[in-house]
Amino acid sequence: MGNILNVLITGGAGFVGSHLVERFISKKYNVTVIDNLLTGSKKNLEPFLENENFTFIDFDVQNHIEISQDLDYVLHLASAASPKAYTQHPINTLKAGSIGTINTLGLAKAKSCKYLLTSTSEVYGDPQISPQPETYWGNVNPNGVRSMYDEAKRFAEAAVASYNRIYNLDTRIVRLFNTYGPKMKINDGRVVTNFISQAIKGEDITIYGNGNQTRSFCFIDDTVLGIIKAMESDSSEVFNIGNPNEITILQLAEKVISLTNSKSAIKFVKLPEDDPMQRKPDITKANKKLNWFPEVSLEDGLLKTIEWVENSID
């Protein structure tokens, strides 16, 4: 490999994908994005469209992928990722995780390059142990209302592991935990942007259940660095990438109200089916093998996200 690498990112017009594009372009890599814009946005890619090192292909990974140039990295991010999006597009979500994963693995095999799958903490389901290490098999409802996402990712992991074992493909899997930050879709129902936009508008902040369920929020800059460190490493393994700072949803709502100086009240509504009660990553493995640690505090990350949402709301 030379210093200028050729990188292909599926789902590169999405939240995490577009931040990865930005980081790779800053390294002067050649970056190709494949995205059908089902949930991604071309606006996220506007800063790169005139860059000679950047190529955008409007394409669905469910179809056979042909790329003429050599590739050094294939990163498969294509998938609806919010409950609102994968509930609206269940079949596409299943296909992106199954057929799309097989197609991108086939591409990486043909190009003899490194492959990374972004998986999710959702593979742990509603966990019965905490924190969740990579060795935990999870507690997942295989045909529940969230199963199209959970099982698509679990299948994707099985496919990656099989290509690694059978074809000796140089693969790695990162399980992302509740990433947030600028470029998130404001209206896709994810809790951080939901709370911030409600607080800014002075609307009631809606909490599902009693707010005692916990999440661990990782700022996008930390997540992207974790993905890149996993991609660049020689370790064909599974890594949790998340921030182990666990807080309740009620505490998050109160923090957002405080940071936005909002007059919003908190409103409790019915908890959705199969909503996990706990999320906390064990990141010991990423610490040791990737030398990766999240560095952005929740308050600093929320302030950056609040500023971005304020500038994005009409």
Image (cartoon, rainbow, N blue to C red):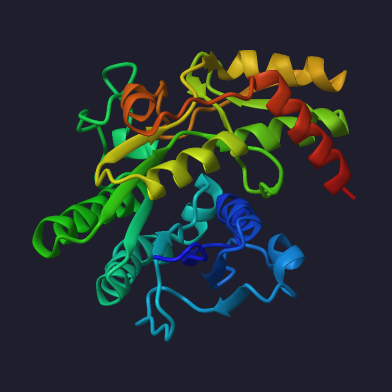
Residue 52 location, x and y as percent?
68, 76
Is residue 120 rendered to the left or right of residue 246?
left
Res. 145 in view:
no
Q: Quadrant of residue 28?
A: bottom right
Looking at the rendered image, the quarter that the N terminus falls into is bottom left
Does residue 248 lie above or below 183 as drawn?
above
Res. 78 in view:
yes
Q: Nearer the viewer, residue 6 or 37?
A: 6
Looking at this view, name the residue that lies furthest to the left.
Answer: 166
Q: Nearer the viewer, residue 309 or 169?
A: 169
* Residue occupying the point 28% across, 25% down: 133
Residue 214 location, x and y as percent?
48, 18
Q: Quadrant of residue 44?
A: bottom right
* Residue occupying the point 31% across, 27% down: 285
How many numbered marks have been drawn onto this rendered protein structure? 0
* Residue occupying the point 11% across, 56% down: 165
Q: Nearer the viewer, residue 155 or 264?
A: 155
* Residue occupying the point 60% across, 39% down: 220
Residue 16 location, x and y as percent?
57, 49
Residue 19 location, x and y as percent?
62, 51
Does residue 41 lie above or below 208 as drawn?
below
Is residue 312 rendered to the left or right of residue 298?
right
Is residue 67 rendered to the left or right of residue 27?
left
Does residue 96 lie above or below 86 as drawn?
below
Is residue 140 rendered to the left or right of residue 16?
left
